[in-house]
Amino acid sequence: MIAQSIPAEALVAEFWQTPKEELCRALGSGPEGLTQTEAKRRLAIFGANRADASQSRSALRKLGQRLWNPLIAMLLAAALVSGLSGDIGSFAIIATVLSLSITLDIVQEHRAERTAEALRESVAIQADVVRDGRDMTVSVTALVPGDVVKLRIGDLIPADGIVLDAQELHVNEALMTGEPFPAFKTDAPCAAALPADATNALFAGTSTVGGSGRMLVVRTGGRTRFGAIASAMAADAPPTALEEGVRRLGVLILRLTLFLMLFVLMTHLVAHRPAMESFLFAVALAVGLTPELLPMVMTVTLARGALRMAKRKVIVKRLSAIHDLGAMDTLCVDKTGTLTEARITLEAHIDPQDRSSDRVLSFAHLNSTFQAGVRSPLDDAILSASRDGADGWVRLSEVPFDFERRCLSVLAARHDEHMLIAKGAPESILARCAAVEIDGLAHPLDAIWHQKMADIQARYARDGFRLLAVAIRSIPVGQRTIAVGDETSLTMLGFCVFADPPKQDAASAIEALTSLGVTIKILSGDHDAVVSHVARAVGLPSERVMTGAEISELTDAALVARVDDVDLFARIDPDQKGRIIAAGDSGAAITSSVSWETASMMRRRSTQHMSAYPSRARPRSPAQPPT
């Protein structure tokens, strides 16, 4: 029976802490999903599953916002007075200049909005959903809370929800957490308080990179974490530094002009000159003091800058934001995909003595080659690093990866040799090992070797690397299948070491920005050790680190007091990024979270476009070098 209403407790922030059976009951859903009738009813209640980040304003509102500028208002008043007094020439000139300036500004913003909308429409996707007990394909905008969505490799997660069932489901959550390595998802209950630690939660904007499964949609549209971020970005931005400066200049000119007009008018009247001639003279003085061409010059200059940036694949929605980019003194950047390649590579393959070992790579390659499931990015990195083939090996059997064991084993055979090859999390593999292999000889895995393995893991973890352990075991020739019980008494071969390498031009771009007086801070959802390692690799200071757990314990005032003294922010979520940027603004710091490619533009070098997040800035102080 389909529920006719959705209880508020079903939509709480930590919905992943609710058992899936209770969540299904609360949402009136189940394995057969919703009915089409109920889905339409809920769509009318919750609206389309769309995170509107543009929310374009009407042309009339845009015009009104520009006319509210004191300088523009003063010029309009001067034009009106000139027209009423018969000075048609002055009226025509001022009206023409203002019309061209305002029109150019509005047209530029409208074109940017259309371009952004076209980009959004170009990535419109569909989802496989279960309704009325059968599979069908619908637009992601038609999804509602309670829908059951099927996920395959390469699918974008269309909404926030939980895993109903999964088969080796791996999700790329770099958009939310900054972690480049895929997160393994399971339908097991989770009591984690932070979304990044929720192993059964799926969030809109992330994507599946391995395996398959089904999800129960809990939140859609602006109620998703991604939607909340988009809504915050779509809110009316505060005036930029340029707009504030022009407004203050307009107010100053307005006051001076009114004072001089009154002074001249009173002086003429005291001197018993004709009142009308005195008034017209004062008006002429006001028109002469008003910089009629200033709005036009500013708009044309900024429009040329927008065109130059457009050639580098950067969309400028607000012309005044160009000034903020050039005036910033602090640049906040993400790590994954911004400073790094967002591509997992195999950096090393080592034995238990931390020496390079081709034998480790060879058996890791066989494991990745023969596994039947969908390969993860780590497997792709292993296969890319090794050009050796199977060398006569054939696959006989496999024990697939699961969340509890955190390892995968295959049984391979060559001639009279049958070998179980296991690969997985170091702690899981070591728990199944009885020996370590050194120079081809097996040594008992005693407490000393356990400590050596722990030291190797700790050392590489401090440098931001991810490790996979590789172990083997000889299997009797007559045995042609393996099970979980065979993953015992293994011999440890060593580790495969993975990393997300920094971009080649990141260090040079940082050096160029630093020479211009720009301070760079990293805001990442990744672990502090990883962020510190990347910072050191690209030449950034990494001593002062603040984590998301520390930020959550600080008030906004306390964060303002500390934000300028921190180099790196690690393990933070998108909401905390917003708090950090707001704290930087409150602390009189220029904070601009933009793409690394935009930063590289400042050193006159074309780069590949990535998404930008413009933020408010203030003018650079005279002591700082110009950009």
Image (tube, grey):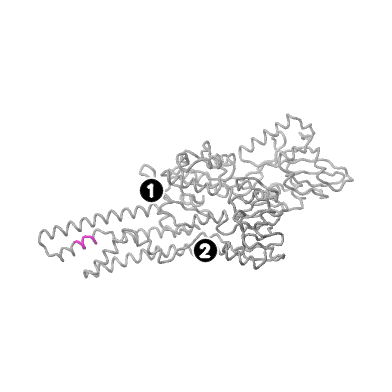
* Residue 259 sits inside the magenta stretch: no
Point out the stretch of residues depicted in magenta: 282-287
Numbered-mark total? 2
The quadrant of the image that shows the N terminus is: bottom right
Instruction: Classify mark 2: helix, strand or loop.
Output: helix
Q: Which mark is residue 619?
A: 1
Crowd around label 2: few <14 · some 14–19 · many ≥20 (10 Å) = some
- Judging depth in this view, the residue of 275 and 462 nearest the camera is 275
Image position, residue 455 (x, y; %)? 67, 33
Q: Amino acid at mark 2?
A: Glu
Q: Amino acid at mark 1?
A: Pro
Instruction: Classify mark 1: helix, strand or loop.
Output: loop
- Judging depth in this view, the residue of 209 and 25 nearest the camera is 25
**Measured Cα–Cα span from mark 2 to mark 1:** 31 Å
Image position, residue 248 (x, y; %)? 32, 53
**Residue lying at 61% horizontally and 37% vertically, measured from the top left:** 462
Is residue 115 shown left or right of residue 270?
right
Compared with 85, 291 (above or below) is above
Compared with 483, 95 (above or below) is below
Sequence order check: which comes first, mark 2 or mark 1? 2
The residue indicated by pointer 2 is: 117
